[in-house]
Image (cartoon, rainbow, N blue to C red):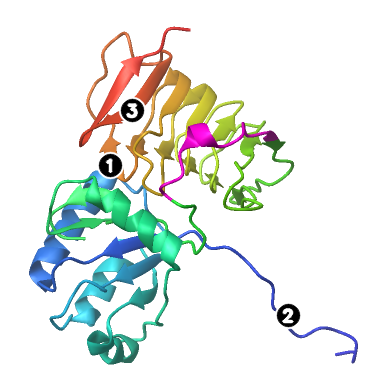
Amino acid sequence: MEASSPVLDFKSTTLYAVRVVLYTADTAAILAALDQRMADAAGFFDDEPVVIDASRLTDPVDWDPLLAALRRHRLPPIGVMAPDALADSARAAGLAQVSLPPLAAKLSSEAGAATPSSAAKVGGARTDAANGDAANADAPDAAAKADTLPAPTARKAVDVVADTGIAVSEPPASAGMAVATLIIDKPLRSGQKVYARHADLIVLGVVSHGAEVIADGNIHVYGPLRGKAMAGARGNTDARIFTTQFDAELIAVAGVYRSMTAALSPDIENKPATVRLTGDKLLVDPLDI
């Protein structure tokens, strides 16, 4: 090896992760709910990194079966948020301690306050045993209202989607500025994923079966939506999904998801439609355009 050849380097990066919030230390209840919800999710969270949030717990957690169950469901655990009383056992199980800054924690708590009480949530789905949330470190202030911000400008994504790649919008310049809309002007094939971080997402083309689109804001698909779509990924209950041809595998808004296994009404199937969250229910309505 030549002396000038680099051996390794460190690069900064941003990782999207699902935050699994535990409200109980009852292993049987957690595993049962996890199995049920991952079956309902139809692979929506496959291979998403997971941060386990045990910060609300005081009872000991049996980490090994929980970690094994997460890996079995293709949810690789990358860290844990735990109080001091549980930190040693978490580290012994191979979990690194991570933390969210105050703004992200505030967003999580406010998003959770709007939901009905439950033992827990898993991977963004309302359930009886674990809460999916983005574990990125710089969530915007949840108290900020969209109508107090300047209108966002469009940002075009150029060559950001590889065969199995992920497109991620740039972070906001400051907490008081609206962020750009992420625009994808090419079809998304199976296995491709796009995450519009702190932004709306516009796709000019088909979202194929097996492709995933995720946005912290709204999602607009000007073409067939045949894959999976998650709007309001950080808990924005006002986010919506719009498409000119609705044929989705799975839809989600603010962590409430619905697997589209039942037959749709003729005025919605393969027609323009919008998805919105009302209470704890996802509604798919015809879109007159």
**For residue 275: magenta?**
no
Give amino acid for label 2: Asp
**Relative to residue 115, is residue 70 drawn left or right?**
right
Give the alpha-carbon distance from disc 1 to disc 3, as whole Å.
Answer: 10 Å
Question: Mark 3 highlights which residue?
Answer: 276
Residue 33 in the image: x percent, y percent? 15, 57
Disc assigned to residue 9: 2
- Which circle, 2 or 3, is nearer the viewer? 3
Q: Image point 17% across, 65% down: which residue?
A: 23
Q: Which residues are magenta?
A: 142-154
- Which circle, 1 or 2, is nearer the viewer? 1
Give amino acid for label 1: Val
Question: Mark 1 highlights which residue?
Answer: 256
**Relative to residue 55, is residue 245 drawn left or right?**
right
Mark 2 secondary-structure assignment: loop
In this rendering, the count of numbered labels is: 3
Main SS, magenta residues: loop
Residue 204 in the image: x percent, y percent? 61, 26
